[in-house]
Image (cartoon, rainbow, N blue to C red):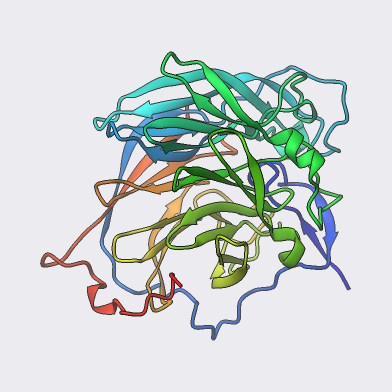
Amino acid sequence: MKRKTISSLVILLLSSLVFYSCNDNATTPVDSNSSQILEKNKPTIVTVSTFATGLNNPRGLKFGHDGYLYVAEAGTGGSLTSDCDQVIPPIGPYTGGYTSRISKISPAGVVSTVVDNLPSSQTSAPSGSLVGGVADVAFINGTLYGIEAGAGCSHGLTGTDNTIFRVNPNGTTTTIVNLSEYQKANPVTNPEEDDFEPDGTWYSMIAVRGNLYAIEPNHGEMVKVTTSGKIRRVIDVSATQGHIVPTVVAYHGNFYIGNLGLFPVIPGSSSIFKVTPSGQIKKDASGLTTVLGIAFDNKDRMYVLESMTAPGFPAPPGSGKIVRILPSGQQEEIVTDLVFPAGMTMGPDGNLYVSNKGFGIPDTGAGEILKIELQKQNGKDWHDKDRHDNDHHKD
């Protein structure tokens, strides 16, 4: 018997909060005896502070060589409509506008605009009018690139497409690759028909060895894009994992992707998967929930951002967490009580930076960036004693 679920993320958690569908690959709670279960009482000292405020649905973020933190803001949507094939209700039809932007934040926390008036779209009212726009940023040789998730005729914006674009020194943008065209011409093996976005809902992008790698949750794939605009699929996640909604990609000797899972939220039903450059995939960690961020420190420890961890449809705000996974595989919560966090990066100072209130918050300018300072005791990290010579995170 199929479990009735809500499909996740359609613009990141965003569009799938109220859409029911039947799915044979529904996940189940992790066994409570699993070695991956969080050690909730393990002592850790962190300092959480507000680094910047006044953002609109902040998502992916990266530091530039200038020391500034660059943040993708999905924007506030708009009222424009289109007459092409639309995303089906209750998520669609979308409406859109040009309210998305990329901002940069100085070391003192001062926010300024890098490029604005970018496509932003929002779901229909029954799903809470959740917004998607620029989803992430990355740097190659000092040049800034952005990835768009809120564009496309199916998202209410006629004459636009989801793209990866380069930000020019004068504040203009140049399209590198048209992602909407690519996905329409190259369908994945197992698309979820009841939860399908023709233009895609690209969410995460990183730079590795001079190329860009991006992940798309709704169709379920990761691609490689060169700066000259060549694109190829690295892995069709749907082919082996089904509709698990892969959301975020990081690199640490191999690629690591996390998945959001399906709604209603089942704590412990999400995972981290290791993906080789040739596209081989295997599960690396389990017992996680609604993963929207992955980062590594210089001791090979993985940090995982969980956007919602309480069961529900969706879970109530304030249940977001950061989990640290040691090379031994042991997990521990180091930060709790985050409000719909949507992105995370490791700063050059060794601290974590998180996009908090990244979706589902109706107030304009409510988004913020939090700084998570990892404290030390007697000059050593709490878990220096737990380091292993054989790092399970790298082949």
Q: Residue at x 75, y 32 (%)?
A: 125
**Does residue 307 appear in this view?**
no
Q: Residue at x 31, y 46 (%)?
A: 347
Q: Residue at x 29, y 28 (%)?
A: 106
99 sits left or right of 295 in the view: right
Which residue occupies the foreground of this view, 200 or 231? 231
Q: Quadrant of residue 127?
A: top right
Which residue occupies the foreground of this view, 151 or 167? 167
**x, y percentage for residue 120?**
64, 25
205 sits left or right of 7 in the view: left
On screen, residue 148 above or below 269? above
234 sits left or right of 68 in the view: right
**x, y percentage for residue 48?**
31, 49
**Does residue 384 appear in this view?**
yes
Which residue occupies the foreground of this view, 115 or 9? 115
Name of the residue lying farthest toward the top: 170
| Quarter of the picture holding the N terminus | bottom right
Q: Residue at x 65, y 74 (%)?
A: 29
On screen, residue 125 above or below 158? below
**x, y percentage for residue 224?**
59, 47
